[in-house]
DNA sequence: TTAGTTGCAAACAATTTGCACGTTG
DNA sequence: CAACGTGCAAATTGTTTGCAACTAA
């Protein structure tokens, strides 16, 4: 790279003495473009299309770094492995359909109220907040699809 | 054992062609007595005090069975392994303190409202609903304890 | 220059499974 | 006795780590 990256994320990395490398930018880019909730393995496969030399270890290390930096979050969507997505403004529920496997996001004002109530009543510093739900989505209920 | 167990859980197992064995009863018993959220490993250790021959595989198999039967639920409390607890009446949040590691439960009427809203707006059959939170508990905020 | 980054392979941790033997209904 | 349950060890899966080579600032 022959220029200085100036996007806020690169800055945020540099501030902690970390480098905004091509591989890290690539992975973050893939995450930001992915409308879903990719796991480390699928990010690795996609990243390899652009950078055939990248290793799975680097994917994991980058995900850990981005997570620690508050840029992405990790969710356990009912399975045994993590799924990742960029941190967004509003809290939302991840609903996974047991039949078709789709992950559906659900936002609602009650979520922020709930967080506020937790802070108020528990007097905690709330840094993580994940809601995962499961069952049958409306489509699979109609078609009668079963897990 | 020289008597027929008649508790509802044994019944619920038998209905699916499953047997309410001593080992299964033991594990369920430990779960029901444990005020916390034990993982498979600690249940195994406790179970071995009563039944020195029990294997970790049996613990895992039993946990899977109890879960499938709707008797217990599994939560991922921020770590890479599962924690288990008997299914209780009301939905609750599991808050894990990043500093002291304590898991604090939080119940609130908003939780049931949220579930109702999800069913209504998403038209789903909601079977799983887990909320995990993290941060610093009020005690660690005071003492300044850090992760 | 030099601290930070990466690939590779080996190490780990949590959980699952094949199979022969044991137990239950 | 026929089906289900269990121990053991090996296999899987997902993730982390040691280390030598590499690269950005």
Image (cartoon, coloured by chain):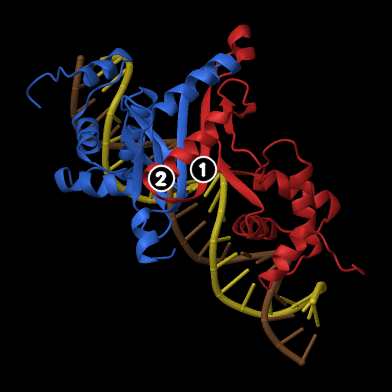
Chain colours: A red, B blue, C brown, D yellow
In x, y percent, where is residue B27? 24, 36
Location of residue B107 by image quarter: top left
CA distance separating discs 1 and 2 = 9 Å
Residue A8 in view here: yes
Given residues A53 and D16, the one toward you in this image is: D16
Residue B12: mark? none
Location of residue A1 by image quarter: bottom right
In x, y percent, where is residue B141? 40, 60
Residue B95: mark? 2
Residue depicted at 76% across the width and 63% down the height: A10
Q: Check disc 1 and report its element: helix, strand or loop.
A: strand
Residue depicted at 75% across the width and 65% down the height: A11
Quadrant where the image shows the C terminus of chain B: bottom left
Disc 2: CA contacts within 10 A as few (<14), some (14-19) or many (>=20):
many
Q: Is residue A146 left or right of residue B82?
A: right
Q: Which residue is mark 1?
A: A129
Q: Is residue B6 left or right of residue A13?
A: left
In x, y percent, where is residue B106? 36, 38
Disc 2: which chain?
A: B
Location of residue A139 by image quarter: top right
Q: Is residue A9 above or below residue A113?
A: below
Q: Is residue A116 above or below residue B86?
A: below
Given residues A14 and B59, the one toward you in this image is: A14
Q: Is residue D3 left or right of residue A147?
A: left
- The tally of labels here is 2
Disc 1: which chain?
A: A
Disc 1: CA contacts within 10 A as few (<14), some (14-19) or many (>=20):
some
In x, y percent, where is residue B49? 16, 48
Q: Mark 1 and mark 2, same subunit? A: no
């Amino acid at each position: 790279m022959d220029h200085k990256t100036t996007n806020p994320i690169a800055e945020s990395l540099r501030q902690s003495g970390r480098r905004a490398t091509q591989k890290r930018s690539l992975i973050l880019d893939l995450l930001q473009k992915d409308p879903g909730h990719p796991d480390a393995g699928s990010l690795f496969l996609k990243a390899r299309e652009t950078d055939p030399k990248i290793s799975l270890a680097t994917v994991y290390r980058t995900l850990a770094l981005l997570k620690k930096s508050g840029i992405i979050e990790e969710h356990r969507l009912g399975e045994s492995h993590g799924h990742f997505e960029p941190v967004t403004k509003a809290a939302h529920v991840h609903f996974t359909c047991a039949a078709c496997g789709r992950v559906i996001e659900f936002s609602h004002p009650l979520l922020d109220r709930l967080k506020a109530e937790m802070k108020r009543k528990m007097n905690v510093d709330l840094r993580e907040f994940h809601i995962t739900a499961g069952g049958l989505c409306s489509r699979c209920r109609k078609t009668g699809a079963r897990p």
